[in-house]
């Protein structure tokens, strides 16, 4: 299996990249982003591409892939809806529309979030935009799956790039095992998300919108 990965430097993306490199069924991983990951591995190729809204210059290099794991995203905090939508909806659809042309029918897994609003009409801004993004992806000629994790536990030395999140996770680290035990359907690890993406890319899943319980179930299949 040949995989494209967006957002490999983020917390979730780091975990997904790790699992891809460990999986013997993955032949190659192409990481696409504005900056390099800083990692080296025989399976890993990197494509630094500054304009993530336009892939015309590199479209010929994006064919021959079986799956795309889209882990790129930003926090909605302090952002106006138009700005958040440009990043969340705009960047995601630019990549997905290009890949649907050059790899029709490929598996495309998008990291959304628990509480996403599929109606696109709710009061919570980020949930509306995520819902709009999910709905647009599901209309494309792709095997699109929406991952909606809740609280994410970083493992294997992985850290968030966002300073505020690093502080929050540092403070919460001793409590996360207890929270996971008390609320098993609310917490996933970076390891589990990566393993679930690979499982869905290989074998599919019965639902296109996957909540925490579905993501964990995909790992165990």
Image (cartoon, helix red, strand yellow):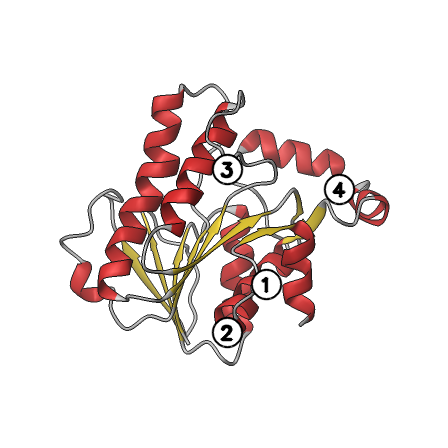
Task: Between residue 173 and residue 84, name the one nearer to us.
Answer: 84
Q: Nearer the viewer, mark 4 or mark 2?
A: 2
Which residue is labeled 2 in the image? 202
Q: Nearer the viewer, mark 3 or mark 4?
A: 3
Label 2 close to label 3 by CB (< 8 Å): no
Return the disc, 3 or 4, that comes first in the chain's sequence. 3
Q: Is residue 129 visible?
A: yes
**Mark linked to residue 48:** none
Label 1 close to label 4 by CB (< 8 Å): no
Q: Does dot 1 land on a helix, a strand or a loop?
A: helix
Return the disc, 2 or 1, that comes first in the chain's sequence. 1
Label 3 close to label 1 by CB (< 8 Å): no
Query: Residue 104's image quarter?
Result: bottom left
Return the disc, 4 or 2, that comes first in the chain's sequence. 4
**Mark linked to residue 196:** 1
Task: Report the quarter where the C terminus lies.
Answer: bottom right
Whether 165 is drawn above or below 200: the answer is: above
Mark pair 3, 4: CA separation: 32 Å
Task: Between residue 81 and residue 205, name the one nearer to us.
Answer: 205
Q: Residue at x 47, y 25 (%)?
A: 121
Q: Does dot 2 land on a helix, a strand or a loop?
A: helix
Return the disc, 2 or 3, that comes first in the chain's sequence. 3
Which residue is labeled 3 in the image? 118
Mark pair 1, 4: CA separation: 23 Å
Pinpoint residue 136: horizontal percent, then vertical percent. 36, 44
Disc 1 crowd rating (10 Å Cα; few below 14, some 14-19, many 20+) is many
Q: Does dot 3 land on a helix, a strand or a loop?
A: loop
Task: Report the quarter where the N terminus lies.
Answer: bottom left
Q: Nearer the viewer, mark 1 or mark 4?
A: 1
């Amino acid at each position: 299996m040949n995989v494209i990965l967006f957002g490999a430097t983020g917390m979730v993306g780091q975990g997904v990249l790790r699992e891809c490199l460990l999986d013997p069924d993955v032949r190659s991983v192409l990481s696409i982003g504005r900056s390099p990951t800083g990692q080296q591995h025989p399976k890993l190729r990197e494509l630094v591409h500054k304009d993530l809204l336009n892939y015309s210059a590199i479209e010929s290099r994006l064919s021959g892939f079986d799956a795309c794991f889209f882990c790129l995203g930003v926090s909605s905090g302090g952002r106006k809806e138009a700005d958040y939508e440009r990043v969340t909806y705009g960047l995601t659809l630019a990549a997905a529309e290009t890949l649907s042309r050059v790899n029709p029918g490929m598996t495309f897994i998008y990291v959304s979030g628990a509480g996403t609003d599929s109606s696109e009409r709710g009061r919570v801004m980020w949930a509306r935009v995520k819902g709009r993004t999910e709905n647009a992806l599901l209309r494309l000629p792709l095997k699109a799956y929406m991952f909606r994790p809740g609280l994410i536990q970083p493992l294997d030395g992985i850290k968030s790039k966002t300073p505020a999140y690093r502080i929050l996770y540092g403070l919460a680290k001793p409590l996360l095992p207890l929270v996971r035990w008390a609320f098993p359907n609310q917490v996933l690890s970076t390891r589990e998300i990566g393993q679930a993406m690979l499982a869905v890319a290989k074998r599919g899943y019965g639902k296109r919108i996957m909540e925490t319980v579905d993501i964990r179930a995909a790992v165990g299949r």
